[in-house]
Amino acid sequence: MADTHFGFQTVREEEKAKKVAGVFTSVASKYDIMNDLMSVGLHRIWKRFAVGLANVHEGQRVLDIAGGSGDLSRLFLDKVGHSGQVVLTDINNAMLRVGRDRLIDEGKATPTAQCDADVAELLEGERKARFDYEHYRILARHLARPGVRVVPLAA
């Protein structure tokens, strides 16, 4: 495999995934605070914009891919109401636990393993995994029924 960059280091591509996972694992509990500081709160505006762009309505189902701390899932849950469903997913277990626990603690979610989505959102996944538009097309085809709206937002 080829070399790539991780910060100021040159690393093998297969090493980068482990290093990225390590970063997200180490910051999971403070991820939202870190984003607030680094973006001066602008990331919250981007996320509200993403939810508006998705045009989610009461009763719909949303698949939040690379949803991490669950902040977008929380916003989507407000839109879909009690008759809808939001499924939070993340490649990093520490991030997923933080998001899941927050949503459960707030009474907004219960653990689930099934999803049939109307909207699939992927905000930060490109930094966590190597996604391109072909991946989005495949994702929409395999994870949701025809007509699904995929809302990718790359930071």
Image: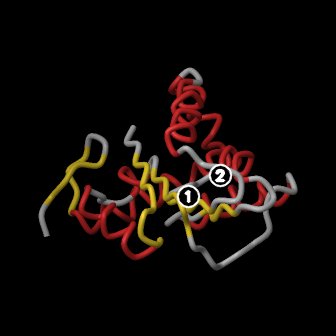
Q: State the residue at coordinates (39%, 37%).
A: 155
**In the drawing, does residue 89 fall left or right of residue 127?**
right
Residue 63 spot, x, y in % from top left = 56, 62
Q: Is residue 44 above or below residue 72?
A: above
Specify few, some or many for label 1: CA neighbours under 10 Å numbering under 14, 14-19, or 20 or more.
many
Q: CA distance from mark 1 to mark 2?
A: 6 Å
1 or 2: tag closer to the N-terminus? 1
Question: Is 8 in front, or is 141?
Answer: 141
Identified by mark 2, the residue type is Ser
Residue beneath label 1, please? 64
Whether tag 1 and tag 2 are in contact, CB under 8 A, the answer is yes
**In the drawing, does residue 17 fall left or right of residue 132?**
right
Residue 144 spot, x, y in % from top left = 47, 71
Q: Is residue 4 above or below residue 37?
A: below
Residue beneath label 2, please? 73
Residue 8 spot, x, y in % from top left = 26, 40
Question: Is 44 in front, or is 15?
Answer: 44
Q: Which mark is residue 13?
A: none
Q: Which secondary structure lies at badge 2?
A: helix
**In the drawing, does residue 142 fall left or right of residue 63?**
left
Question: On the image, which quarter does residue 32 sit in?
Answer: top right
Question: Is 56 in front, or is 89?
Answer: 56
Identify the coloring.
secondary structure
Q: Is residue 11 above or below residue 52?
A: below
Residue 102 spot, x, y in % from top left = 77, 53
Specify few, some or many for label 2: CA neighbours under 10 Å numbering under 14, 14-19, or 20 or more.
many
Question: Is 51 in front, or is 3?
Answer: 51
Identified by mark 1, the residue type is Asp
Quick one: quadrant of the N terminus?
A: bottom left
Question: On the image, which quarter does residue 136 sit in?
Answer: bottom left
